Image (cartoon, rainbow, N blue to C red):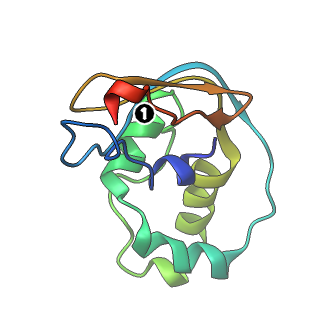
């Protein structure tokens, strides 16, 4: 699961959950997979990303590296910034572990990079 995907996920489908965002990450296996850089795509995605959540997720799994803690003011024209964002959003992948609801503590397994967000019947 890419961190871009994580940035848009929540557990709001559960009972007793008002927001369900951001999901916590408990990583067992993380890997890096090269993805072709596309500056235009990144420029369009940056405004949609919750940057604080991205930084926290990257730090949690040990891949914050030199990702800036804030979005560059002129990010559309800052290729270095876009490449760093691209790396963390698209090339760092959670292969196995768990996602954790911040309100209930319910866990969702991640296996082979695929999060299983199915809840037990009594939780929905």
**Residue with the most extreme top position:** 28
Please name whichever residue, 16 or 73, is drawn nearer the observer in this view of the structure. 16
The answer to whether residue 28 is above or below residue 10 is above
Indicate the secondary structure of the residue bearing disc 1.
helix
**Residue with the most extreme front position:** 121
Mark 1 crowd level (few <14, some 14–19, many ≥20, 10 Å Cα): few
Q: x%, y% of residue 112?
A: 74, 28
The answer to whether residue 12 is above or below residue 45 is above
Please name whichever residue, 47 or 96, is drawn nearer the observer in this view of the structure. 96
From the viewer's perspective, is 81 left or right of 37? left
Q: x%, y% of residue 42?
A: 59, 72
Please name whichever residue, 57 or 96, is drawn nearer the observer in this view of the structure. 96
Q: Which residue is mark 1?
A: 59
Q: x%, y% of residue 40?
A: 65, 82
Quadrant location, the N terminus: top right
From the viewer's perspective, is 37 left or right of 68? right
From the viewer's perspective, is 69 left or right of 113? left
For residue 78, say whether it is visible. no
The quadrant in which residue 51 appears is bottom left
Residue ID at (57%, 68%): 82
Quadrant location, the C terminus: top left
Residue ID at (51%, 27%): 62
Q: x%, y% of residue 19?
A: 22, 49
């Amino acid at each position: 699961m890419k961190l871009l995907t994580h940035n848009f996920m929540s557990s709001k489908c559960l009972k007793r959950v008002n927001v369900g965002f951001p999901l916590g990450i408990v990583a067992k296996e993380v890997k890096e997979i090269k993805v072709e850089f596309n500056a235009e795509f990144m420029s369009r995605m940056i405004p949609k990303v919750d940057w604080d959540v991205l930084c926290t997720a990257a730090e949690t799994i040990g891949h914050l590296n030199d990702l800036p803690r804030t979005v560059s003011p002129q990010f559309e024209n800052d290729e270095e910034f876009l490449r760093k964002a691209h790396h963390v959003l698209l090339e760092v992948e959670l292969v196995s572990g768990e996602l954790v609801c911040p309100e209930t503590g319910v866990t969702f397994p991640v296996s082979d990079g695929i999060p299983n967000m199915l809840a037990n019947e009594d939780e929905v």
